[in-house]
Image (cartoon, helix red, strand yellow):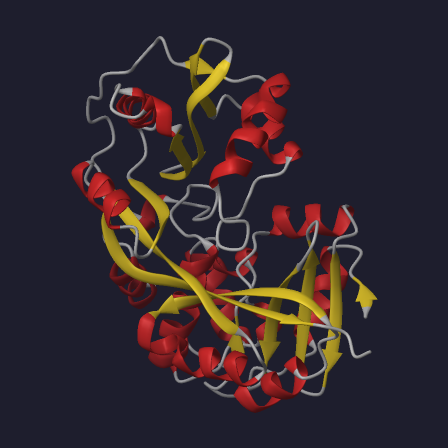
Amino acid sequence: MESIRGWDAYQRCIGAVRRATRAYTSNLYAARDQVERWCADGRLHALPADGAVLLLRATQDFHHVYHVAEDQGTLGTALATLPAGLFVTDLVGQDDDLDPAVATYAAAGFAPHRFLQRMVRVQTPGEPHADDTDIETATADDAPQVAAFLGRLLDRFAEQVPDLDDLRREADAGRLLLVRRGDAVAGMLMYALKGAAAELRFWHVDDDARGQGVGRRLMAAFLARCAGARRMTLWVIGDNARSIAIYRHYGFTPDGLLDRIMIRHKEPHR
Amino acid sequence: MSKILDILAEIRPEFDWAQSDDFFEDGMLDSFDMVTLVSDLDKAYGISIDGMDIVPENFSNVAAIEALLVRNGATP
């Protein structure tokens, strides 16, 4: 396994796999700045194989697996070289298109975990939205408290749990919103905004604070602050009917993109 | 150029593609869209874009896409 030190090394690694036919397959969707952060943190490693490469991104207690392969055959051969340990993969695409990769990962010992679906809201820029000016904009100092709040709620395999650096960065950019009950976090919303596109990354309300308008206030603030965006996206746990209904209420609809999460836990031979 | 704009409009009809110089900076394309765009360009031009070329810089505006197509043996 070789450590990937930067963007150029990352590009060389991926470029070594030929994309000659429609059988070429990849689940790598990371933006450049994200890849560069992973490299800088020393968290990205490559496992090259014949006609394929696996990229492994380390988290606290498991690795995310990404692949680039000439076809499902070379992908399957590469997956067979994975060492013991806990590995999670995200296979993103339209439902039927994912079947071949899902089958290849299943043959390599990965089991389905959950799936996410993307929802989209298209709006006319400048649509009026009433802001909630009492919403607190978090600071970097709030990051540990927000991390603890999310740590209790999120599925660490299915949801890209933000680390402290990520939370501090978004707080500094004014994109991490809070509602408190005393000193505790009752609800939070974190978003990304780039040009004409906004992404609702996390929106959670503590169980004890439900039904008190906390979520509604956070959403109102998000819509107001992203009023200039033409397109908003979010990912939701695919079978969470309650959340899906709430997002539909706010004008989001599924766009057909799915993220199928699969997990393999292989014990070392004794 | 109009064929490329047509393909982009199929993916995201809500955007005015002719007005942007950087589709990623302007939030009009994300990495998932790039994969769809690669597939659509492959089909439209009868090519197979090289894996090394599937990076945001090559899809950031119409001129970049045209240059990419030429490098991959197509006439935009």
Say whether residue B15 is left or right of residue A55. Answer: left
Task: Pick the residue in front: A190 or B17.
Answer: A190
Estimate the x, y position of residue A182 in percent, counting from the top left: 46, 8
> Is residue B11 toward the left or the right of residue A137 in the image?
left
Say above or below: B24 vs A2.
Answer: above
Vertical order, A124 against A145 (above or below): below
| Quadrant in the rendering for residue A144 | top right
Compared with A190, A70 (above or below) is below
Q: Nearer the viewer, residue A236 or A171?
A: A236
Res A31 visible: yes
Residue beneath the point at 42% across and 61% down? A114
**A109 is higher (above) or lower (below) than B17:** below
Residue at 43%, 83% (x, y): give it.
A100
Residue shown at the point (19%, 22%) measured from the top left = A128
**Which quadrant is home to the N terminus of chain A?**
bottom right
In what quadrant of the picture does the C terminus of chain A appear? Answer: bottom right
Residue A186 falls left or right of residue A29: left
Q: Report x, y in % for residue A12.
A: 73, 69
- Left or right position of A150 against A234: right
At a point 36% along the width and 77% down the height, the residue shown is A97
Q: Position of residue A13 (x, y in %)?
A: 72, 70
